[in-house]
């Protein structure tokens, strides 16, 4: 790869949309174990004119889900869980539908449980802003006695099930979800700056401010509360270097500290519905190929996820055959990440 050429071309794309008057993002591009680009663009703190640095932390939102699933597989490896069993024993007071679903279906978004962020079911904002996992589980339990659809008849992205999955981890390990992730994943992999708060009074000191844009074009910082932080569906704060350590571990390392390879492979299998249709989701990862963006790289298989919350957006993509990883972490909620991500990916593959 022509490193100077790649960085200059990426800079030209980015600076059309990002400046010292806007929030921005941290970007890392890797080829194998080589770091091609690791750079910050835009502002970490507009009020104090602090630029984003490559080691700054961002809330990665739904990119947390891959950690949730790996944690469950780790517990399965210890013989504490079978993901093809019903979660009934963990939620004995839930409606009877809990007997019809499996933990795997919860992980794959095919359980039929209602989405707590859906407009027709969303609780009052002030409740979500202050609720801990226990309180939100009560909200999910109270949605009614019926599922949205029969399990494994369709794919429907669901944050509710991941809140429940985080509680399963808590019940089996005796540790709150965030504590489990920090001690059993971050520490062994030396992800020193990554953080998974279980309560909104916990905040990563390395985390940049997240920004939203008002109708008049000005930027403002949304509240740091559980709407922004999330639960096991999206509470991790991390940076590109720590995520590179994570990606090296799950995609490249042969000796496994966390999981045997045969069990890790479960995460990368597309889930099959009852009629045999394969969905492009495994256990915490989207799977497949990105089409209609660039003939230069849409033939490469991709394992990816995005994340979005108040003030933060992320995209982490692993192009398997090319041995390339692109990680974009932003503190600019109004930024159309795909308008930047795909042109950046074009440059990477054109120069490869």
Image (cartoon, rainbow, N blue to C red):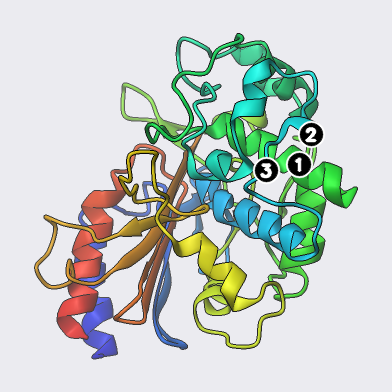
Residue 243 falls in image quadrant: bottom right
Residue 176 falls in image quadrant: top right
Residue drawn at x 79%, y 34% is: 90
**Few, some or many C-alpha atoms within 10 Å of disc 3 (few <14, some 14-19, many ≥20)?**
some
Which circle, 3 or 1, is nearer the viewer?
Answer: 3
Residue 293 picture location, percent across and down: 14, 58
Q: Secondary structure at mark 2?
A: helix
- Image marks 2 and 1: residues in contact by CB distance under 8 Å: yes
Residue drawn at x 61%, y 53% is: 69
**Left or right relative to 174: residue 41:** left
Q: Secondary structure at mark 3?
A: loop
Q: Secondary structure at mark 1?
A: helix
Residue 192 picture location, percent across and down: 72, 70
Say which quadrant the C terminus sits in. Answer: bottom left
Residue 265 picture location, percent across and down: 52, 69
**Few, some or many C-alpha atoms within 10 Å of disc 1 (few <14, some 14-19, many ≥20)?**
many
Residue 30 picture location, percent across and down: 40, 80
Tell me if residue 345 can be seen: yes
Instruction: Work out whether residue 173 or residue 308 is closer to the camera in this orientation and state it.
Output: 173
Q: Look at mark 2 in the image and give the residue it sits on.
A: 90
Which circle, 3 or 2, is nearer the viewer?
Answer: 3
Tell me if residue 59 can be seen: no
Furthest residue toward right: 174
Labelled disc at residue 85? 3
Q: Is residue 112 above or below residue 105?
A: above
**Left or right relative to 223: residue 216:** left
Labelled disc at residue 168? 1
Marks 3/1: CA–CA distance:
12 Å
Instruction: Work out whether residue 153 or residue 53 is closer to the camera in this orientation and state it.
Output: 153
First in residue order: circle 3 vs circle 1: 3
């Amino acid at each position: 790869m022509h490193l100077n050429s790649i960085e200059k071309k990426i800079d030209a794309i980015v600076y059309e949309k990002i400046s010292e008057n806007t929030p921005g993002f941290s970007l890392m591009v890797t080829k194998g174990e080589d770091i091609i680009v690791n750079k910050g663009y835009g502002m970490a703190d507009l009020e104090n004119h602090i630029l984003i640095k490559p080691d700054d932390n961002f809330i990665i939102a739904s990119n947390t889900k891959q950690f949730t699933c790996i944690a469950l597989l780790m517990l399965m490896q210890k013989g504490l869980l079978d993901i093809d069993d019903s979660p009934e024993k963990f939620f004995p007071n839930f409606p009877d539908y809990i007997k019809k679903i499996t933990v795997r279906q919860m992980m794959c978004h095919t359980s039929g449980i209602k989405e707590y962020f859906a407009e027709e079911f969303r609780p009052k904002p002030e409740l979500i802003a202050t609720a801990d996992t226990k309180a939100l589980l009560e909200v999910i339990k109270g949605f009614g006695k019926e599922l949205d659809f029969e399990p494994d008849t369709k794919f429907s992205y669901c944050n509710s099930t991941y809140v429940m999955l985080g509680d399963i981890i808590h019940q089996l390990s005796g540790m709150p979800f965030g504590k489990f992730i920090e001690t059993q994943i971050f520490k062994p992999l030396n992800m020193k700056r990554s953080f998974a708060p279980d309560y909104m009074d916990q905040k990563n000191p390395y985390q940049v401010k997240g920004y939203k844009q008002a109708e008049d074009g000005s930027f403002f910082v949304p509240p740091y509360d559980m709407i922004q932080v999330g639960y096991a569906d999206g509470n991790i704060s991390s940076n590109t270097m720590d995520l590179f350590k994570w990606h090296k571990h799950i995609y490249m390392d042969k000796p496994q500290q966390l999981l045997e390879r045969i069990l890790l492979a479960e995460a990368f299998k597309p889930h099959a519905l009852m009629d045999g249709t394969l969905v492009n989701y495994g256990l915490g990862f989207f799977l497949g190929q990105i089409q209609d963006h660039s003939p230069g790289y849409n033939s490469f298989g991709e394992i990816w996820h995005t994340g979005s919350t108040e003030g933060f957006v992320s995209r982490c993509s692993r192009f398997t055959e090319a041995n390339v990883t692109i990680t974009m972490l932003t503190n600019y909620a109004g930024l159309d990440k795909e308008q930047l991500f795909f042109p950046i990916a074009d440059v990477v593959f054109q120069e490869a």
